[in-house]
Image (cartoon, rainbow, N blue to C red):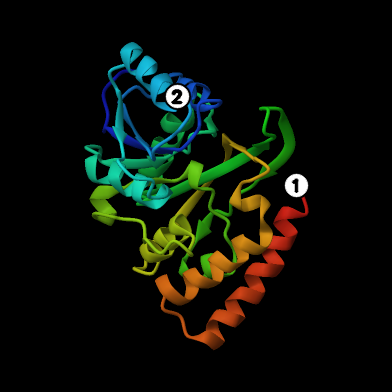
Amino acid sequence: MSNHGELVSIITPTYNAARYIMETIQSVREQTYLNWEMIIVDDCSTDNTVENVKQEMKEDPRISLVELTSNSGPAVARNTAIIRAKGDYLAFLDSDDLWLPQKLEKQLMFMKEKDAAFSFTDYRIMNEDGGKTDVIFKCPPLVEYKDLLKNTSIGTLTVILDKRKIGEVQMPLHRDCSEDYGLWLNILSKGIGAYGLDEELAIYRKCENSLSSNKLKSAQKTWNTYRKVGKINILLSIWYFVHYSVNGYKKHSKV
């Protein structure tokens, strides 16, 4: 595919990701859509993450690195990248996850067809060592605000936002909340719909110490996101949380 088309800014926070970051970057460099920038923000890694990224930067000028001076968490790292993003689109990819080669091309085409401000896709689960599982999380065709309150069906590694339609965004900075989920809720609360492309275009690495592996902590963060980010009253929060819990159980019983 040619280099023409709108610029996509890829937001990648890193922390001690030396084991995976080069594979993640490679999955971006293999994209059939060429007009992208990858903004990697390192949150004070103590391993070789920074050295590995710098090595990749020599190979590809579309990759840039920001080194934070104090360990601040993934929301600050993502927000730092978002502020620096020059693209019309924002895409999110964490430092241990992967994209399939046609991810950007197919998803941008889909967004143009739907005139969508927010899109996401199906994704597959792989284990810590990169072995693909048979588990694929399918996305619904459309998620609106009330749907998302009942079900965390949007995989962050699959999201693309059109900044021209949504405006400037930042992830909420409550450490005890789910910052990506909080941002999606903030966007959808404005009446914007998230359109799902029912095609597997990304691969999520499920690590043993990841938040999704710690169900109780994940549930607490979801509850806090309702109350602190969504400002939802306690009775409605309970109602939505019951639905979230049932849907979460169905979802994770597959893994």
In the image, residue 140 lies at what x, y percent?
Answer: 58, 54
Residue type at mark 2 is Ile
Q: Upstream in the sequence, badge 1 or badge 2?
A: 2
Residue 32 in view: no
Can residue 170 be seen at all in this image of the molecule? yes
Q: Where is residue 27 in the image (x, y as percent from the top left)?
A: 49, 23
Judging depth in this view, the residue of 122 and 113 nearest the camera is 122
Q: Which amino acid does label 1 sit on?
A: Val
What residue does disc 1 label? Answer: 255
Q: In this view, does 165 lie to the left or right of 129?
A: left
Q: Which residue lies furthest to the bottom in this view?
A: 235
How far across and down, in percent of the image, does residue 8 sit? 31, 34
Give the answer, above or below, for where 38 lies relative to 155: above
- Residue that label 2 marks: 25
Residue drawn 49% across and 27% down?
A: 21
Numbered label attached to residue 212: none
Residue 206 horizontal side relative to residue 93, left or right: right
Q: Which of 2 and 238 is in front in this view?
A: 238
Percent position of residue 157, x then y: 50, 42
Say above or below: 17 vs 193.
Answer: above
Q: Is residue 34 above or below residue 180?
A: above
User: How far apart in space, not on screen, are marks 1 and 2 (Cα)?
Assistant: 26 Å
Crowding near the residue tagged with mark 2, few <14, some 14–19, many ≥20 C-alpha atoms within 10 Å: many
- Residue 196, compared with residue 224, is above or below; it is above
Could you tell me which secondary element the residue under label 1 belongs to?
Answer: loop
